[in-house]
Amino acid sequence: MSYYTTDVYEIKREITLFSSKISKNLKKATSNFVLDMQYGIAKKTSVLTTEIARALDEGIKLKNTSERLCDNMENIEEDEIETIKNNYLAIVRENVFIDKDDKVVVLFDDSEIAKPYGKKFEDLCRVRDASQPKTTLVNGYHVCEAVALSSNNKQPIPLYSYIYSTDSNGHKSMPDETIKSLDAMKTILKHPISGIFDRGYDSNTFFKYFAEHPDDDFVIRLKGNRNVIVKGHEVLVSKMAEDRKGKVNMTLFFESENKEVKLSHTRVGLPCIEGSKKAYTIIFCYGLSEEELLLLITNRHVNDKKDVITIVREYFYRWRIEENFRHTKSEYDWENMRVRTLKKMNVLNLMLMIRVGHVALMANKVDESLLAIKMIERSKSLRADVCVWIYQITRGIKEALAYAQKGIQCFKRIEKRKPSRQLEIWEFL
């Protein structure tokens, strides 16, 4: 038997309680705005303000509700935005995966919002449309993202997401935006970080940054044309790989098949770090692809083959950030946002990040939370043996809220004012 009314009430209550934690120390109007956005995005799985307004079902003109939401995005103050971020990340801090060195594993990557037909959006720039088979430049925006892994099921929990344009005044460079996210992570998480990066971050800028912050670790995928220092001489890493054979065996597990790979590692220096005696470790991964060798570099201390295997395994967790991108774009139609100013985009993006983070926190407790299990059942998915649960929970929440007869208004705190004590003038005859 399906208890639709119970499920609707439970998920509404869950969203309300989570929103109240996010809205701590905010004024009432902003708190209501946060709750409206969280409920509307959850019910409609859309970032269109008109769809969010339909989900609220306020009994007034749809245009008025949509305009109110847009006005709130434009008028929200910067200190309120920081309060929302801090409240959200305070919850996330308690649920992130920390490695054996007491560091938070954070995955960094860039994405894009493609607006090929957009003309009226603020500071449109040119971005590479990754959805196209060939390299295609279109109008759009860059997005700098950081994602942590949850403590139990290694679900991707978004920590940082910022939309920016290279044509905006004051923009310096794309690496500068990544460094801002690195600084933000260290301040917010209150832990040293272990950053995982793809080959697009094989840059002297990042190597120098981590050299100045020795408490933080990194694992970066190298390009084959990188020069390193071996015994006082510069050597091309692709040439080094030809002279080595993997002595460490490892099995990588993928959905389609398992791969048996061999690993090798060696200590090197970097020419860009002048005067530094710091040594780095390069890991060579053979057998993963016939076309290209996997090369990783890290500043971690590598003592034995267990450390090498751990580093490679954590690098492949990087695909969880790709799942996060895919989830927001496919389930919430992220690229279809219609607000035109960068401030509104980033406020809307923050509301979506919090909604996805809430889903990830539910997925982290899928083994112990009855509500998460019920949402997975509601999704009616074909597969049960999945590694990432956020898709199914998102669909389950949408399916459950489809039976809601009213919006979220009844869950708000409605102020009941006392009767007026104004003196009345009686006319005595």
Image (tube, rainbow, N blue to C red):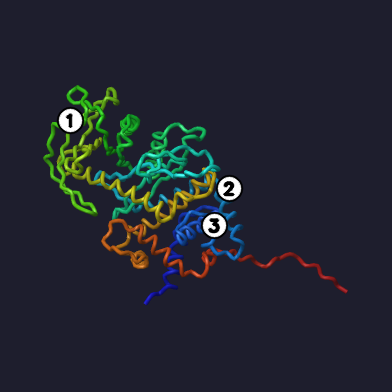
Determine which quarter of the picture holds residue 65.
bottom right
Q: Position of residue 395 (x, y in %)?
A: 39, 62
Is there CB contact under 8 Å for labels 3 and 1?
A: no
Give the image quarter of residue 305. Answer: top left
Q: Earlier in the sequence, mark 1 or mark 2?
A: 2
Label 1: how many Cα within 10 Å (few below 14, some 14–19, many 20+): some
Give whichever of discs 2 and 3 has the lower sequence position. Answer: 3
Q: How far apart are marks 2 and 3 (CA)?
A: 19 Å
Mark 1 sits on what residue?
240
Under tag 3, what secondary structure? Answer: helix
**Type of amino acid at the residue the image marks with label 2:** Asn
Amino acid type at image mark 1: Met
Which numbered disc flags the more N-terminal residue, 3 or 1? 3
How far is mark 1 from mark 2, CA to CA?
56 Å
Residue at image location 18% in from the left, 26% down from the top: 230
| Residue in the picture at 56% in, 54% down | 69
- Where does label 3 land, which residue? 50
**Disc number at residue 75?**
2
Q: Residue furthest right?
A: 429
Residue 189 seen in this snapshot: no
User: Label 3 sits on what residue type?
Assistant: Thr
Kindly identify the residue that appears in the image at 48 percent across and 54 percent down.
47
* Residue 117 higher or lower than 375, as above or below: above
